Image (tube, rainbow, N blue to C red):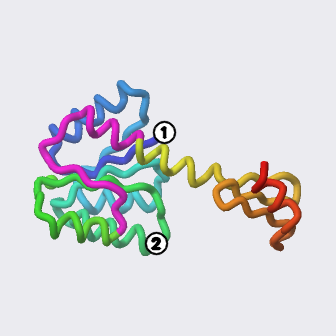
């Protein structure tokens, strides 16, 4: 699992990186928004931890740009700001979760695990067997793109 941290407070970014690496994650850091945007767009990661207040390009702008570019990587917003409006605009811009500084490392870890879990559930709900595509979440079965009612019934009652 690869995590990108975009955070200009070097000491905080380095402590988080060290802690995450001890947990077995591979961690990249961008110390400003410009590098963060470039890395988010060009180097795939499983989670992006994104500070809002950043030099050059702020976190909210990065978030909007990567979502507009179709990048669906879960984003955990990090900020010293703690007003309701900031949380609302962050979530509205496509953030998946929100953590206010100062935060405990244990809480960060728990939120990362929750985001990874949520993301893998979405991916694994589709099962492909030959030309059959089964969506375990909706119980829908398709063959060559067409819905297959007989199989749908059998799976629903299973
Ligand atoms: Ca900052």
Disc 2 within 8 angstroms of ligand 1 (CB): no
The residue carrying mark 2 is 69
Task: Give whichever of 88, 9 is nearer the camera.
Answer: 88
Report the span colored magenta. 94-113
Q: Which residue is mark 1?
A: 1
Q: Nearer the viewer, residue 48 or 84?
A: 84
- Magenta stretch holds residue 101: yes
Is-magenta flag for residue 5? no
| Label 1: how many Cα within 10 Å (few below 14, some 14–19, many 20+) | few
Question: What secondary structure is found at the residue carrying circle 1?
Answer: loop
Whole-percent x and y of residue 12?
17, 39
The Cα–Cα distance between marks 1 and 2, rounded to whole angstroms, is: 22 Å
Spot the residue most to the front: 157
Mark 1 within 8 Å of ligand 1, using the beta carbon: no
Q: Quadrant of ligand 1?
A: bottom left
Q: Image quarter for residue 122?
A: bottom right
The reply to whether dot 1 and dot 2 touch (C-beta < 8 Å) is no
Q: Which quadrant of the figure has residue 149?
A: bottom right
Q: Name the spot of residue 6 as percent of width and height, x first.
A: 28, 52
Residue 147 is tagged as none
Which circle's residue, 1 or 2, is located before the other in the chain?
A: 1
Q: Residue at x 78, y 48 (%)?
A: 158
Quadrant housing residue 73: bottom left
Please, what secondary structure does the residue beneath circle 2 have?
loop
Give the percent coordinates (x, y) of residue 141: 79, 62
Task: Tell me: residue 121, above or below residue 138.
Answer: above
Left or right of 134, for residue 75: left
Residue 123 location (% of width, % of height): 60, 53
């Amino acid at each position: 699992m690869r995590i990108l941290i975009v955070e200009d407070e070097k000491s905080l970014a380095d402590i988080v990186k060290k802690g995450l690496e001890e947990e077995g994650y591979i961690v990249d850091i961008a110390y400003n928004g410009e590098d963060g945007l470039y890395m988010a767009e060009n180097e795939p990661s499983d989670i992006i931890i994104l500070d809002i207040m950043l030099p050059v390009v702020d976190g909210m702008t990065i978030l909007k740009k990567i979502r507009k570019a179709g990048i669906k990587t879960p984003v955990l917003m990090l900020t010293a700001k703690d007003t309701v409006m900031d949380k609302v605009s962050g979530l509205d811009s496509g953030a998946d979760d929100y953590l206010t500084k100062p935060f405990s490392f244990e809480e960060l870890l728990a939120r990362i695990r929750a985001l990874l879990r949520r993301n893998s559930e979405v991916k694994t709900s589709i099962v492909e067997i030959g030309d059959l595509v089964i969506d375990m979440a909706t119980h829908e079965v398709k063959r060559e793109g067409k819905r297959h009612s007989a199989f749908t019934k059998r799976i629903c009652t299973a």
